[in-house]
């Protein structure tokens, strides 16, 4: 099965949540000897399987078909006194009444809507025997949600401790409650079995910058485990300590610290490389800035040169316009002169034609012919 946060899986390498879940079932195991047990919202079945080691018969019920199928294939196949059924907590899949000696349901009721919580408790009362015992747990809303400002998306209705006791007390005559929380522990125990004695609880807390023993009980319950019955609760049923002899929580934190150390080392290397890169980029930027200034100066010089050339060109253009005007005037004068010459030439042509006509008339006259003959005789003589 895949861990979604709604159901605990025993293979989950999460020490604190494993301590919480297993400790509840180990408490219930002490009450399961030779009894017929119902585990409501059994999840993937690890807890029901544990109870089946001592109980005469255990039935696990869960609303998830996937969880029930997993529980059957993983646990029930090798256990004759263990079975798993699909069913809702507020509609248990059993006919009749007074079937079970012990009913367990851990971290279930807060997942159910408020109206269904009442039906859930009524269903437990229906199937439990008159002398039966119900072991049920729920988060302490004050510590679980209010103080940290946390909202579990899977929870519908959580209880304060007094509210939870009153809720169970409406159906059962006797209710005993146990607080649960994972604390770091230094465990001191007698190595000589003959010298065993009651374990004394001592408390210490880090306050105002230092550790100091507590004079009062400073524990606070993150979860509440209630033992409810119409019969008086066995006074021998007391609190217990669950010891992780593998020290997985410490090892897990060390692994996390080692991972964090490696990440910090890589981060420091990256920071150093980044600083080097920043220095290189700063050098390149400075070089670019100098080149930019040089180009700026060159550009300003070029612009000034062009401005001077533009001024000169403008002056030349004015001069050229003036010369062009003079040339146009000169051309106009030339055109006028040409026209005058053309008129004179025409006049001369007419004069020439007139003179030629007169000459032709003279040459055709008798006088011209007599003169011509006289000049000819004179040349002969």
Image (cartoon, grey):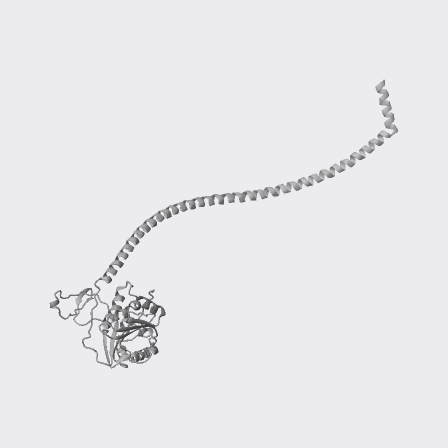
From the top left corner, tell me how far across and down residue 139 is, in percent: 28, 72
Farthest residue, direction left:
195
- Name the one closer to the observer, 201 or 265: 201
Q: Is residue 298 above or below residue 194?
A: above
In the rendered image, is residue 83 in sight?
Answer: yes
- Name the one closer to the observer, 172 or 300: 172
Residue at x 26% of width, y 64% of height: 15
Residue at x 67% of width, y 39% of height: 334
Q: Quadrant of residue 176?
A: bottom left
Farthest residue, direction top:
381
- Quadrant location, the C terminus: top right
- Name the one closer to the observer, 127 or 146: 127
307 horizontally vs 238: left or right? right
- Name the one closer to the observer, 381 or 201: 201
From the top left corner, tell me how far across and down residue 367 is, in percent: 87, 28
In the rendered image, is residue 139 in sight?
Answer: no
250 horizontally vs 66: left or right? left
- Quadrant location, the N terminus: bottom left
From the top left corner, tell me how far across and down residue 24 is, in percent: 25, 71
């Amino acid at each position: 099965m895949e861990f979604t946060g709604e159901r605990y899986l025993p293979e989950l390498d999460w020490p604190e949540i494993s301590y919480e879940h297993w400790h509840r079932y180990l408490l219930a195991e002490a009450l399961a000897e030779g009894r017929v047990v119902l585990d409501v919202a059994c999840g993937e079945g690890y807890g029901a399987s544990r109870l089946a080691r001592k109980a005469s018969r255990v039935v696990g019920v869960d609303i998830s078909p996937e969880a029930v199928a997993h529980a059957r294939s993983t646990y029930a196949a090798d256990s004759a006194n263990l079975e798993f059924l699909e069913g809702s907590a507020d509609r248990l899949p059993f006919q009749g009444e007074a079937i079970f000696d012990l009913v367990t349901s851990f971290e279930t009721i807060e997942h159910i809507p408020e109206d269904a919580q009442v039906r859930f408790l009524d269903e437990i009362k229906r199937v439990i025997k008159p002398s039966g015992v119900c072991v049920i747990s729920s988060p302490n809303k004050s510590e679980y949600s209010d103080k940290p400002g946390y909202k579990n998306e899977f929870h519908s209705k959580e209880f304060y401790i007094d509210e939870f006791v009153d809720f169970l007390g409406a159906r059962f005559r006797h209710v005993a409650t146990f607080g649960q929380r994972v604390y770091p522990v230094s465990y001191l125990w007698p190595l000589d079995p003959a010298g065993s004695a009651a374990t004394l609880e001592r408390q210490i807390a880090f306050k105002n910058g230092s550790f100091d023993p507590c004079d009062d009980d400073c524990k606070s319950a993150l979860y509440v485990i209630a033992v409810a019955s119409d019969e008086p609760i066995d006074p021998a049923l007391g609190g217990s300590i669950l010891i992780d002899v593998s020290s997985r929580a410490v090892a897990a934190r060390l692994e996390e610290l080692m991972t964090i150390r490696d990440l910090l080392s890589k981060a420091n290397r990256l920071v150093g490389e980044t600083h080097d890169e920043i220095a290189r980029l700063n050098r390149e930027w400075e070089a670019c800035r100098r080149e930019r200034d040089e180009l700026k100066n060159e550009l300003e010089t070029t612009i000034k040169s062009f401005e001077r050339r533009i001024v000169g060109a403008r002056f030349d253009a004015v001069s050229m316009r003036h010369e062009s005007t003079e040339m146009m005037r000169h051309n106009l004068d030339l055109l006028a002169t040409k026209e005058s010459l053309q008129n004179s030439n025409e006049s001369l042509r007419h004069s020439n034609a007139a003179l030629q006509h007169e000459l032709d008339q003279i040459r055709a006259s008798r006088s011209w012919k007599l003169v011509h003959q006289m000049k000819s005789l004179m040349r002969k003589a």
